[in-house]
Image (cartoon, rainbow, N blue to C red):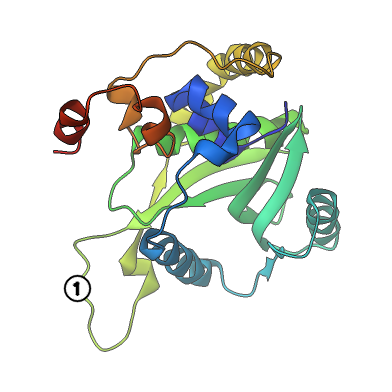
Amino acid sequence: MYLSKSLYTRGLQCAKSLWLKKYKPEVLQVPTDRTVFETGDMVGDLACGLFAGGKEVPYEGTSFDEKIALTRRWIEEGVSDIYEASFSFQDIFVMVDILHINANGSMEINEVKSSTEVKDVYLHDASVQYYVLSGLGLDVKRTNIIHINNKYIRDEELELDKLFSIVDVSSEVKELQRDIPSRLANFEKMLENTQTPPPIDIGTHCFDPYECDAKSHCWAHIPLIAYLISQT
């Protein structure tokens, strides 16, 4: 099955979208506007400044196994902050935006978002990270969503502690743990069929919480006027 945290949240939005991503990715729209991704990267880099002096697991040029091994080595060496810390458990691979390791060995997950609020989908994103780390036996004491503070007014110097809001979502994330095993089992059963996607019709889930990159494929049978209305 092998899922990432992004594939997990994709499946929560629409199981058919997950199936298409795994078995028919050529029908998905490739985003032409890189602004969102570039903004996310910039915000992520800035947020690392809240935990300065850490080490970053390379995104490119390393395999999943190499990322995981490097993360494990740095933890054993006593590195207190690891950016893109990588773990795998039960065929789920996650990269934690910022993993903070306390002096007693307990850990804090920090998921960075370029949004100005905590959205439900972010909680699911963080919850699967907690699921993986706790499943590996790691002591996760806290899970945070770090997002932009839209009330911050910059002076001459950029103050990262004021630019960002750090929100403790530990209780919400723990509450979501009980549903993860059944969801994973449903995804696994659905993905066993490599020839036919699940029969999920179009609906509001095509746009919520994100506009699906499979929309043009799934909406191909809809008359043009209906499609245009959906864009408004």
Residue shown at 85% from the left, 63% from the top: 77
Is 114 or 140 nearer to us in this picture? 114
Residue shown at 28% from the left, 53% from the top: 116
Residue shown at 66% from the left, 43% from the top: 94
Q: What amino acid type should be assigned to the residue bearing mark 1?
A: Ile
Is 94 or 101 nearer to us in this picture? 94
Quadrant where the C terminus lies?
top left
Q: Is residue 98 above or below residue 219?
A: below
Q: In the rendered image, which quarter is residue 192 located in?
A: top right
Q: Is residue 202 above or below residue 72?
A: above
Specify whether 132 is left or right of 172. right
Q: Which residue is mark 1?
A: 153
Single out the residue that lies furthest toward the bottom: 156
- Residue 40, how many percent across, how many down? 43, 61
Specify whether 179 is left or right of 213. right
Specify whether 184 is left or right of 144. right
Q: Is residue 43 above or below residue 213?
A: below
Quadrant where the N terminus lies?
top right
